[in-house]
Amino acid sequence: MRKKIVAGNWKMNLNLEEGQKLTSEIVNMLKDENIKDVIAVLNPPFVHLYPVKKLIGDTPNLFLGSQNCSDKASGAFTGETSAGMLASFGATYVIIGHSERREYFKESNQLLTEKTKQALTNGLTPIFCCGEPLNIREAESHEAYVKQQLTESLFDFSPEEMSKIVIAYEPIWAIGTGRTASSDQAQEMHAALRTHLASKFGQELADNISILYGGSANPGNAKELFSKPDVDGGLIGGASLKSRDFVEIVKSF
Ligand code: 13P
């Protein structure tokens, strides 16, 4: 059975004190809520990983993730952080190929294959991001565009490797804009991606892959989005910076 996952992507926000406060609030709220079948993941900036992990402790269903990792294992790569380092800090998830990294840091589909390999080699679950810009959506070629992102980055993995990857569909026009995709638009794309994965890896494997939606998700629209059969959770930006909003989204299944 595929997992329900709500991952918070803090992006480059919050200083140490703010990050610790947010984490403590989420930990306390989740303990009260006793959430059983949803996995919550906090993805702070690298420098917050250690203090956030210490605060998460053994909170049930709450995990640590990173926003990025290097495509290399180790060596003279100034400023980079390896997947092995993240694992040694207790991270179990890593976001790979966020559209902001693709756009601002020119990360290619080929580079993202290498990052995904590093994550898998070190036992991290990659949250592999895909999604189209507005002009591609308006030209109605969004499905082909996003399928190609998966094909070029992930289709050389073995079925065993692929079964460990989580997909996050984040239409770029919906990120940080307040203009969320409708639940029907999300469902349509998620179903298309699952069919695409099935064409390469088989239906059973595709049925077990979690596909998250990201882009202006909030406590007001999460229930509707998560009610769709192929939407298995969310990758949350702005709303993950507010403890109550994040926890309400976790409770939205
Ligand atoms: P927002 O939720 O702020 O739109 O960001 C989505 C996102 O990019 C999560 O990775």
Image (cartoon, rainbow, N blue to C red):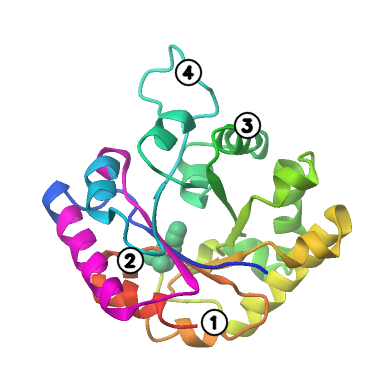
Q: Distance between the residues labelled 2 and 3?
A: 28 Å
Q: Residue at x 84, y 65 (%)?
A: 203
Q: What element carries label 1?
A: helix
**Circle number at residue 225:** 1
Q: In this view, does 74 lie above or below 105?
A: above
Q: What residue type is labelled 1?
A: Leu
State which tag comes first along the sequence, 4 or 1. 4
Task: Assess whether residue 40 is covered by the magenta stretch.
Answer: yes
State which tag comes first along the sequence, 4 or 3. 4
Q: Distance between the residues labelled 1 and 2?
A: 16 Å
Q: What residue type is labelled 2?
A: Ser
State which tag comes first along the sequence, 1 or 2. 1
Q: Is residue 54 left or right of residue 132?
A: left
Q: Is residue 66 left or right of residue 214?
A: left
Contact, CB < 8 Å: mark 4 with mark 3?
Answer: no
**Circle number at residue 240:** 2
Q: Distance between the residues labelled 1 and 3?
A: 31 Å
Residue placed furthest toward the left: 17
Q: How far apart are marks 2 and 4 (CA)?
A: 31 Å
Q: What residue type is labelled 3?
A: Glu
Residue under label 3? 114
Contact, CB < 8 Å: mark 1 with mark 2?
Answer: no
Ligand 1 shows up in the quarter that is: bottom left
Q: Decide whether the magenta segment is chiefly helix, strand or loop.
A: helix
Q: What stretch is highlighted in magenta?
A: 19-48
Q: Is mark 2 within 8 Å of ligand 1?
A: yes
Q: Is mark 4 on a helix, strand or loop?
A: loop
Q: Distance between the residues labelled 4 and 3?
A: 13 Å
